[in-house]
Image (tube, grey):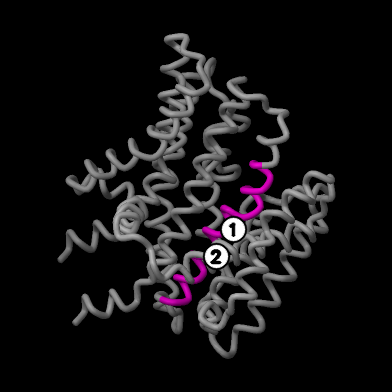
Amino acid sequence: MLKLQKEKQHEQWVDYAKLFACILVVLGHLFQSFAKTNLIDGSSVVYNTFQHVIYLFHVPVFFFCSGYLYQKISPINSWSNYKKNVWNKFLNLGIPYFTFSIITLVLKSFASNSIVTPQEYSFLETLFLHPASPYWFLYTLFFIFVFIPSLNKKTISYICSLVIILKIISILLSNKIALPFCISSLMSNAVWFVLGMVVMKFNALSKTNCAITLISLLFIPLSILLYANNIKSPWISIMLTFLGITMTCLLFYKAKQIPKYLNVFLNYMSKYTMQIFLLHTICAASFRALLFKFDIQSFYIHLCFGILISFFLPIALAYIAEKSFYLDFFFRPVKVIKGKTK
């Protein structure tokens, strides 16, 4: 019965949306590294357009899905629930954040001559004040969980108004006042998290029609067209981000018939989305440094191995970690602890 309830709660489209966003994050970082090491032309129109388009929406999709699941499975209706939720989020986000941030910083210190992105801040400043990419997402998400409760009739209008005001303030203060990263990032991204909560609260995805889905598909041509004509503003970016999130979520939500072989593959990959997210830069950068050490400069070799290493080495390491309590703890601390105490 419990297993049946969990399956009923589970929404597969969320897994697929997160996996899709993760794939774009990996490709974005991979091509950035190629541009910085002159494997590709960093000034090319194709490269810059691709980077511009994916950075409009891929991480906001993560925030949206996190808010959607938070509203669905983590109702906060008491102080004890709040404390338990914050503690679980601290473990689930904080342990991977500190673990893989430290690994990244140590690797950068040992390979300072060959790294693509030099470290701007000291070790402690990076960990606590200026989180490194891509781990800033975990850092920001934790603060969002701390400050935003789940929605109910009393809080919904207050919370929605608050995050919209914070987003507007973050735009108006952009490049004018240097706020601490934890505050500026929360102000910029909480709106997408709460959007996911609202969509879940009102079951909005099930109420959309084909017309809305088709309108959301305008995200890609509009993003390319506006970028090509150098039409930029933070308000346009917000509109495009909203369209990008809508497009991604509706495409996977509406996809009723996926070939069985593709479904099996996507399910397997989505199982390791978190591990891919945590390890892809470490794995890809290490292997890229090895290729350069042997003077291998071919873009196609770097591309093929870069993609394979970014996705399948993290999966292999995650599979190995699953066999050990001590290793898996760094990826899924709360789940491992609960499994150990049963």
Q: Is residue 70 magenta?
A: yes
Which quadrant, please, contains the C terminus?
bottom left
Q: Which residues are magenta?
A: 50-72
- Left or right? Give the position of 72 relative to 41: left
Whether residue 201 is situated above or below residue 277 in the rendered picture: below
Is most of the magenta stretch helix, strand or loop?
A: helix
Residue occupied by mark 2: 64
- In the foreground, 275 or 43: 43
Whether residue 117 is situated above or below residue 328 in the rendered picture: above
Q: Which label is found at residue 28?
A: none
Label 2 to label 1: alpha-carbon separation: 6 Å
Q: Residue at x 72, y 52 (%)?
A: 223
Q: Residue at x 20, y 49 (%)?
A: 325
Q: Name the amino acid type tagged 1.
A: Pro
Q: Name the amino acid type tagged 2.
A: Phe
Q: Residue at x 30, y 60 (%)?
A: 260
